[in-house]
Every structure is written in structure tokens, then in C-alpha cells.
Image (cartoon, rainbow, N blue to C red):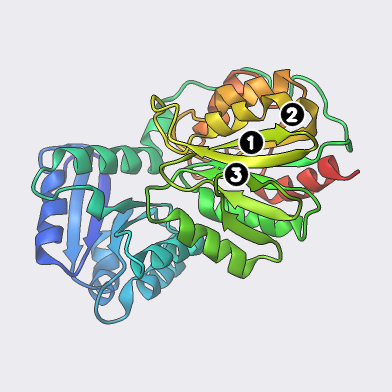
């Protein structure tokens, strides 16, 4: 299991109390020189005991384990080493909130085990491989330098904007929570798309609602889009905004059905194009390019557009794609985004 392959291989530790799952995850990476499975542990105590000897550069972690449990294992692991941790979870009423809590404590992403068959490995291998390679930085380091300007034109300090849109993917839950926390009790409505599989967005909204001074809920079809509330797009449904007279509403739809993600950041952003100068749109950390084209359309319509910078992004994919299109009017570190949004939405 600990055979040396290449210097650049990701050294993976697998932690799960199921013997079958441990063996299945280890088998996923057999023969792939980009990975070396350095150890498989049945509990958090076993991982921590062998942490120095295994010297992993990434960890997959189950949350429902005997002994100290998954969350305590995550806390202690990240206290000792800041490693990328991917949670292997299930969208049950018990595990979904634990997964959201793990993301808030520093896990970088998760995979819903119930979406995949551990007998047919191809789909699970594909998603885990992509996540591990991207999060470990092997893809980012191979990308050419970004030479386009980050700020094509200056943005005003204040304005009459009164709608906030946020899109995110990998690394997004804690980033969204920080931006919302920095907003305090906003006097404007907020629409949010965070890529998540079904079963997790309700738990995400519940956590935010419990930990923030503002109201946070899963969006519903035909609900009024009112100031002071943050609306989370439910997994499997696109969130759009629509105007009826002087009032705004949220709508949900499975269409378009050709998008890579559902909900899609692009779909939300494009639905707000008619609101133009009323919008401030923020694109946070995430894998891929969802949101970049929508952000460009909003910028062209007069919206004020902000992206998270590379240094504070878990994955600088979606922000990078927006910058490459000149869709970003400003690029800021995560701790500065909430304060800047308040400046732009003060009127």
C-alpha cells in the first residue's frame, strides 16, 4: 500500500469504519501514478496515531465512526496539519448537518456516497480524482499565468444597488458564511447558489440561519424576494429572480436541463440581467467556470461584479474564468468582500 510512485503523487489516507468502503476506495486508485494510498484507518484514533509515518497530503474522511468520531478527528487533524480533507458522507437527516458542519470547520469538499455504487467504481473514481487533483493544486500549477487585467474600470464606493447575488462551489460554504457574517443585518435581499447534491442545501441553509443574525432559508417557488433574507438555491433546482411590478420573486425550475450544475450560478446571474444596475454580484471559490458568463452579462448590464482572489480561494477556478472574460470589476480577498459589498449596497 505504501509503495513509492512519483514525487508529485498525492499521498492519500483513507479513513472509514467500513472495511468494504476502505478497500473499495483504495482500489479506486490502484495503478494510477498520480496517487499513492499511504494508509487506511478504521477510526480517527488510528489515523492520528499513524499521521507522521503515513505523511499524507490529502485525506478522505467518514464522519460516522466509533471512538472520537469524524468531526473531532477533523478538528485534531487540521490542528496538527492543514491538509485538504474530503468528506465521504450520505444525505441522511443525521449526516447532512454533520457534513455541513465539517465544511465549516475546514474540510474542503465532500462526496455523497449514496450517489455512487461501490460496485461500479468508474463514476466515484472520476469525481474523487477530479476533486483531489484540483484541491491538491496539481492542475492549478500547470495552468498558464493569468495576464488579463483584473479591474477593467473602477467601481464607485456607493450607489443605488439593492440586490446581492452570490455564487460558489468547492470551498464555498465557509466562504459564503464569512461574507454573510460580515454583512451583519443587511437591508437588501440576497440570492445564493452553492453547488451541492440533493439532501444538503436544506442543512446548509439551516446552519446559516442558526449562526447568522440574518434570516436564511431555502428558496421556494414564487416567494417574495424581500430585504434582510438570504435565499439558498435548493439542490436539483435552478434559482431565478423575476420582477412583477415593484416586487421581486424567486422562481425554481429544472430548466435549462443542459447545465453542468443544477442549481447553476450562470442561470441565477442571467435571470438578474434585467435588474442591471441594481445588482452587486459576487463569484467565490469553486471548481470549473460556472458563473463566469453570467457575471459578464451582469457587468455589461451595469451590475457591480466582484470575485474572490486566488490567494484566499480553495479552488481558483470560477473566479479565474470570470477574470479571463473581463467580467470582474474587482478582485478581493475573502475577508474584504463583505465590507466592500456593504459599501456598494449602502444608499
Residue 166 visible: no
Which residue is depicted at the point 43% across and 46% down?
A: 235
Q: CA distance from mark 1 to mark 2?
A: 9 Å
Residue at x 45% of width, y 41% of height: 237
Task: Give the labeled residue for mark 2.
Answer: 275
Contact, mark 1 vs mark 2 (Cβ under 8 Å): yes
Residue in view at x 83 percent, y 29 percent? 155
- Residue placed most toward the observer, 163 or 33: 163
Q: Which mark is residue 241?
A: 1
Chain-order first, disc 1 or disc 2: 1
Q: Is residue 156 above or below residue 179?
A: above
Which numbered marker is on residue 222? 3
In the figure, 279 relative to 57: above or below?
above
- Residue 34, x across and y down, in percent: 23, 37
Instruction: Tell me which numbered mark, 3 or 2, is placed earlier along the sequence.
Output: 3
Between 168 and 307, the one lying in front of the other is 168
Pinpoint residue 176: horizontal percent, then vertical percent.
60, 51
Amino acid at each position: 500500500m505504501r509503495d513509492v510512485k512519483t514525487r508529485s503523487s498525492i499521498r492519500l489516507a483513507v479513513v472509514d469504519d467500513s472495511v468494504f468502503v476502505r478497500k473499495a476506495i483504495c482500489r479506486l486508485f490502484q495503478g494510477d501514478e498520480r496517487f499513492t494510498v499511504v494508509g487506511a484507518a478504521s477510526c480517527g484514533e488510528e489515523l492520528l496515531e499513524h499521521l507522521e509515518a503515513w505523511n499524507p497530503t490529502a485525506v478522505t474522511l467518514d464522519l460516522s465512526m466509533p471512538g472520537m468520531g469524524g468531526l473531532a478527528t477533523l478538528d485534531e487533524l487540521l490542528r496538527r496539519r492543514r491538509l485538504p480533507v474530503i468528506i465521504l458522507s450520505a444525505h441522511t437527516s443525521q449526516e447532512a448537518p454533520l457534513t455541513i458542519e465539517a465544511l465549516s470547520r475546514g474540510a474542503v469538499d465532500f462526496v455523497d456516497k449514496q450517489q455512487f455504487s461501490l460496485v461500479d467504481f468508474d463514476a466515484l473514481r472520476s469525481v474523487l480524482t477530479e476533486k483531489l487533483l484540483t484541491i491538491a493544486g496539481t492542475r492549478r500549477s500547470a495552468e498558464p499565468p493569468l495576464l488579463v487585467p483584473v479591474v477593467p474600470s473602477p467601481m464607485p464606493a456607493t450607489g443605488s444597488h439593492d440586490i446581492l447575488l452570490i455564487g460558489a462551489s468547492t470551498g464555498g460554504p465557509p466562504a459564503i458564511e464569512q461574507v454573510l457574517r460580515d454583512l451583519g443585518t443587511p437591508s437588501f435581499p440576497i440570492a445564493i447558489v452553492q453547488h451541492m447534491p440533493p439532501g444538503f442545501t436544506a442543512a446548509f441553509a439551516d446552519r446559516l440561519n442558526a449562526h447568522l443574525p440574518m434570516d436564511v432559508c431555502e428558496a421556494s417557488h414564487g416567494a417574495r424576494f424581500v430585504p434582510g433574507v438570504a435565499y439558498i438555491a435548493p439542490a436539483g433546482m435552478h434559482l431565478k429572480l423575476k420582477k412583477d411590478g415593484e416586487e421581486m420573486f424567486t422562481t425554481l425550475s429544472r430548466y435549462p436541463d443542459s447545465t453542468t450544475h443544477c442549481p447553476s450560478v450562470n442561470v441565477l446571474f442571467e435571470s438578474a440581467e434585467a435588474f442591471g444596475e441594481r445588482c452587486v454580484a459576487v463569484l467565490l471559490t469553486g471548481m470549473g467556470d460556472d458563473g463566469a458568463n453570467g457575471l459578464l452579462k451582469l457587468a455589461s448590464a451595469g451590475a457591480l461584479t466582484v470575485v474572490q482572489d486566488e490567494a484566499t480561494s480553495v479552488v481558483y477556478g470560477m473566479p479565474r474564468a470570470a477574470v479571463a472574460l473581463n467580467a470582474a470589476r474587482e478582485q478581493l480577498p475573502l475577508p474584504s468582500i463583505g465590507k466592500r459589498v456593504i459599501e456598494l449596497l449602502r444608499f
